[in-house]
Amino acid sequence: MDRAAAAYATARDQAEQHGIAGERATSQAQRAFVLAFTDPDAADDELHLADQLLRGLDLRATTLTTKIAALVRDAGAISSLEPVRLLRTEISDAGLTASEAALGLAVCFHHAVQDDHHKISAAISRLRDLTHSGDYAYYVDIAQFMADRSLDHASGARWLDSERHTRNRWRGLVIARQAYLDTRR
C-alpha cells in the first residue's frame, strides 16, 4: 500500500508538471483510496486535495473513487449504510463496473473491521456476483483475506508476494483499523 500511495503521488506530480488536470485529479483520488485503508487521518488530507483537484472537472469515475475512499476511511465507524446504498445507485446509474467492485470491497472492509460474520458473508457474496465475469475477481479473495476466511473459490490471481503474505497484509489492515477505532473510543 505504501508503494501504491507513492506511485500515485508520483503520477499526480508528473501530471501536474505536464499540465494534465484530469490525470492529476485521478491519481490523487487513487492515492486517497489507498491511504484510506492504511491511514484514515492521512486519507482525510488526501481526500481534501482530491476534491480541490476535481473542481471544475467532469470526471465521474474519479469523483466516485473519492466517495468510496471516504467510506473506506470511515470503515468500522459507519453507523448507517445508507450512504453506501445511495452511492451504489449512483454507480449503477453511471454503469461503472470498476467502481461497483471497489465499493463492494469497501463494504467488505467495513464489515470485516466490525467483525460481523453474517454481514461480511453477504457482502462477499454480493462482491462475487459483481465480479463473476472475472474482472476484479481477486477482490473476492482480498475480502476473504480481510475476514480471515479460507478461499472457497479462489480467483486464480497470482500474487506478487505469496498468498500467505498477501492474506496477512490485508488481515493486518483490518486488525490495525480495529485498534485505531479502539483508541478513538
Image (cartoon, rainbow, N blue to C red):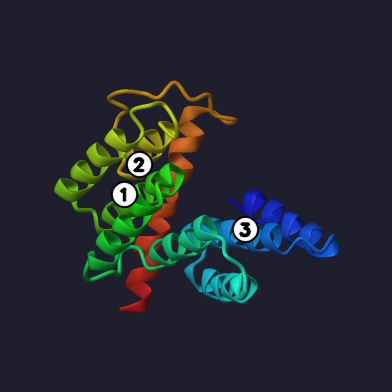
Q: Is residue 116 above or below residue 69?
A: above
Give me the residue at 30% from left, 34% from top: 128
What distance separates the C-alpha of mark 2 from that of mark 1?
6 Å
Q: Please give the label number shown on residue 143.
A: 2
* Mark 3, other Cα within 10 Å: few <14 / some 14–19 / many ≥20: many
Point out the tag, 2 or 1, that comes first from the N-terminus: 1
Q: Label 1, on which residue?
A: 108
Quadrant in which residue 146 is drawn: top left
> Which of the two labelled residues, at mark 3 and mark 1, occupies the earlier sequence position?
3
Question: Which amino acid type is marked by label 2?
Answer: Ala
How many marks on residues? 3
| Within-10-Å neighbours for mark 2: few <14, some 14–19, many 20+ | many
Q: Nearer the viewer, residue 138 or 55?
A: 55
Looking at marks 3 and 2 on the same chain, the residue that comes earlier in the sequence is marked by 3
Label 1 Cα neighbours within 10 Å, binned few <14 / some 14-19 / many ≥20: many
Numbered badge on residue 26:
3
Q: Nearer the viewer, residue 179 or 128?
A: 128
Spatial separation of the CA atoms under disc 3 and disc 1: 23 Å
x and y percentages locating residue 6 in the rendered image: 70, 55
85 to the left or right of 45:
left
Residue sitting at the far right: 17
Q: Are marks 2 and 1 in contact (CB under 8 Å)?
A: yes
Q: Secondary structure at mark 1?
A: helix
Which quarter of the picture shows residue 74?
A: bottom left
The disc labelled 1 sits on which kind of residue? Cys
Whether tag 3 and tag 1 are in contact, CB under 8 A, the answer is no
Compared across the picture, whether 52 is left or right of 36 comes to: right
